[in-house]
Image (cartoon, helix red, strand yellow):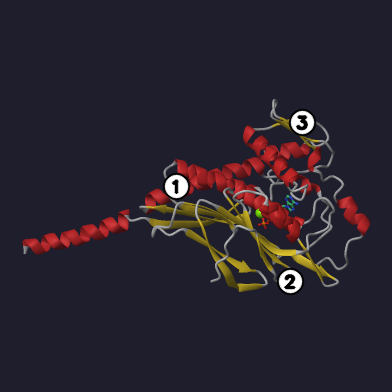
Amino acid sequence: MRLKNKYKFLVVFLLLTTSFYSQQIHRKTLKLMGSRFDISVVANDTVSATKYINLAINEISRIEKLISSWDTNSQTSEIIKNAGIKPVKVDKELFDLIERSLAISKLTDGAFDISYASMDKIWKFDGSLKTMPSEEEIKKSVLKVGFQNIILDKENSTVFLKLKGMKIGFGAIGKGYAADKAKMLLISKGVKAGIINASGDMNTWGKQPNENDWKVAITNPLNKNNAFALLPISNKAVVTSGDYEKFVTFNGKRYSHIIDPRTGYPASDIVSVSVFAPKAELADALATSIFVMGTEVGLNRINQLNNIECIIIDNKGGIHNSKNININKI
Ligand code: ADP
Ligand code: MG
């Protein structure tokens, strides 16, 4: 009888310890930076998982306050308000993000440009655009765009937009940066594994509780239900830019919502780009850049960079990948 009780106790104890102390994926979905974020952490119990997830949320919200151009009190808005007037002193964090953004502009010959934000919105993707904008309108729309006119003074930590009416926006890099920072913070707090997924910008670290790598499925937007590749991603980010929701068609040509900041014309060659990189920030920015650069130039550029890979789906359904990526067919 005593033995039996002891045995029962042992079973209950084992059950308790496995449910309380076994590693599980805990996940929360919420809207941050105007986008859907899924934050997953591997943790022993719900209490610590919630604590970690909240830390990540606070970090992402903090960054949103710094880089938002909607929030009229943000440092970014202050820079925009003073365009053509005077340099604005900003936190080192924002200064550094702008400095890195300019480096990506140079790397992509201006395909990536945070000053895209001043572009006149002559392209509409809600069905209201019935005729193609004129060449003149298109040229005029990019007059205030140009990363060369973003002047940084490192010593004084100031940013100056040279032209009146210039604007900057972090739509193609901010989510990636926030995901990197949230990941770094959780790693520093001892979280062994997790995924920060910012509307498809995935940033992972560690492994799944079953010791397998995290995997990402790549789908073809022209055939949405079919994933064509399942790729392991460990301690890496993968970011996808796609035009399958927002585009217009004129004379049989498809124009996407990503506009070439140098010409004012929308990118039209590509329907989806996934970039794999050690950091989500770079992956995010490069995905948008490749869209603008097109398949050939984009692949060429990626093949010159270490530890960065991409998969491109063109508007004819063709699949192109950079030289060091191994697409396992599912
Ligand atoms: P999503 O945010 O929908 O995943 P992207 O990551 O490709 O898409 O970013 C697109 C956003 O980036 C646009 O909505 C706009 O805010 C901004 N953007 C568009 N074109 C450029 C560009 N050439 N350089 C930098 N940012 C851009
Ligand atoms: Mg992006």
Q: Earlier in the sequence, mark 3 or mark 1?
A: 1
Residue 7: image location, x then y, percent: 14, 62
10 left or right, relative to 48: left
Label 3 belongs to which residue?
87
Residue receiving disc 1: 52
Toward which corner of the image does residue 14 lie, by quadrant? bottom left
Q: Looking at this rendering, what residue extends furthest in the top direction?
A: 155
Residue type for callout 2: Lys
Question: Is residue 73 something one can see in this rendering?
Answer: no
Under circle 1, the secondary element is helix
Give the CA distance from mark 3 to mark 1: 38 Å
Could you say where residue 323 lies in the image, as x and y percent from the top left?
63, 58
What is the quadrant of the N terminus in the image? bottom left
Which secondary structure lies at badge 3? loop
**61 over 254 or under it: above or below:** above
296 or 32, nearer to the observer? 296
